[in-house]
């Protein structure tokens, strides 16, 4: 697991937004790219302490841990509590592949009544509450970068992005946020 205590966030100290939307770097987190067949999900869910989602666009959360559905046998597991996800998943006696990607990603929290409009400025997906409700998630594009979106609350989204693209994503979000102010 990447040591989150000493790793500096590429967005450290950055804040942005406008009157209706706020942009903030997410708290440090451990992340694991998880692949597993359907027969392993019960054991993995038990180890993680949450029911791994099996339906497209769905996520599951328990405390500071989330599992985000990315494909029929693929999830992104995020933990902000400091737990060693590799050890947690290693304790499950079930067939799976777990890759620590904590070093690869960072996240931006987009919140406020203008959050949906801000993200829609660079994302081709319909993010309306009716189509993309609380708990919905998707691997999609924002501008020119791949992101994973998770709707955390009605007016709050978590945008997972590769560290190397985080400055671009934050800048594009800041520009879109300023446009929603009008």
Image (cartoon, rainbow, N blue to C red):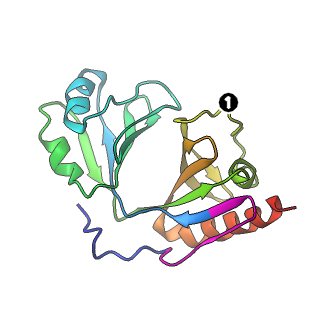
Question: Residue at 55% of width from left, 67% of height from top?
Answer: 165
Q: Would residue 9 appear left or right of 116 to someone viewing this image?
A: left
Question: Residue at 75% of width from left, 68% of height from top?
Answer: 175
**Measured along the vertical axis of the image, is residue 31 above or below residue 73?**
below
Question: Residue at 59% of width from left, 49% of height from top?
Answer: 156
For the C terminus, the quadrant is: bottom right
Where residue 74 appears, as percent x and y from the top left, is 38, 36
Furthest-top residue in this view: 39
Where residue 67 appears, as percent x and y from the top left, is 38, 39
Q: Would residue 153 appear left or right of 131 to someone viewing this image?
A: left
Q: Would residue 144 appear left or right of 58 to someone viewing this image?
A: right
Q: Quadrant of residue 142?
A: bottom right
Task: Decide whether residue 157 is among the magenta residues.
Answer: no
Judging depth in this view, the residue of 63 and 170 nearest the camera is 63
Q: Which residues are magenta?
A: 11-22
Where residue 82 appears, as percent x and y from the top left, is 26, 58
Where residue 178 appears, as percent x and y from the top left, is 78, 67
Query: Under tag 1, what secondary structure?
Result: loop
Question: Residue at 24% of width from left, 38% of height from top?
Answer: 48
Residue at which label 1 appears: 131
**Measured along the vertical axis of the image, is residue 177 above or below residue 87?**
below
Q: Quadrant of residue 92?
A: top left
Q: Residues within 10 Å of mark 1 (few under 14, many from 20)?
A: few
Q: Quadrant of residue 171?
A: bottom right
For the N terminus, the quadrant is: bottom left
Task: Decide whether residue 20 is among the magenta residues.
Answer: yes
Q: How many marks?
A: 1
**Measured along the vertical axis of the image, is residue 179 above or below residue 130?**
below
């Amino acid at each position: 697991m990447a040591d989150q205590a000493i790793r500096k966030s590429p967005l450290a100290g950055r804040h942005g937004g406008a009157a209706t939307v706020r942009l903030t770097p997410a708290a440090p987190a451990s992340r694991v790219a998880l692949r597993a067949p359907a027969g392993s999900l019960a054991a993995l869910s038990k180890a993680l302490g949450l029911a791994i989602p099996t339906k497209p666009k769905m996520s599951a959360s328990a405390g500071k841990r989330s599992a985000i559905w990315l494909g029929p046998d693929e999830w992104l597991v995020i933990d902000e509590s400091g737990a060693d996800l590799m050890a947690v998943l290693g304790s499950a006696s079930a067939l799976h592949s777990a890759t620590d990607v904590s070093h690869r990603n960072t996240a931006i929290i987009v919140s406020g009544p203008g959050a949906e409009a801000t993200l829609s400025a660079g994302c081709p997906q319909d993010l309306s509450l009716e189509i993309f409700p609380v708990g919905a998630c998707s691997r999609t594009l924002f501008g020119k970068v791949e992101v994973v979106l998770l709707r955390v609350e009605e007016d709050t989204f978590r945008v997972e992005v590769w560290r190397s693209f985080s400055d671009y994503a934050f800048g594009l979000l800041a520009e879109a946020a300023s446009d929603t102010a009008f």
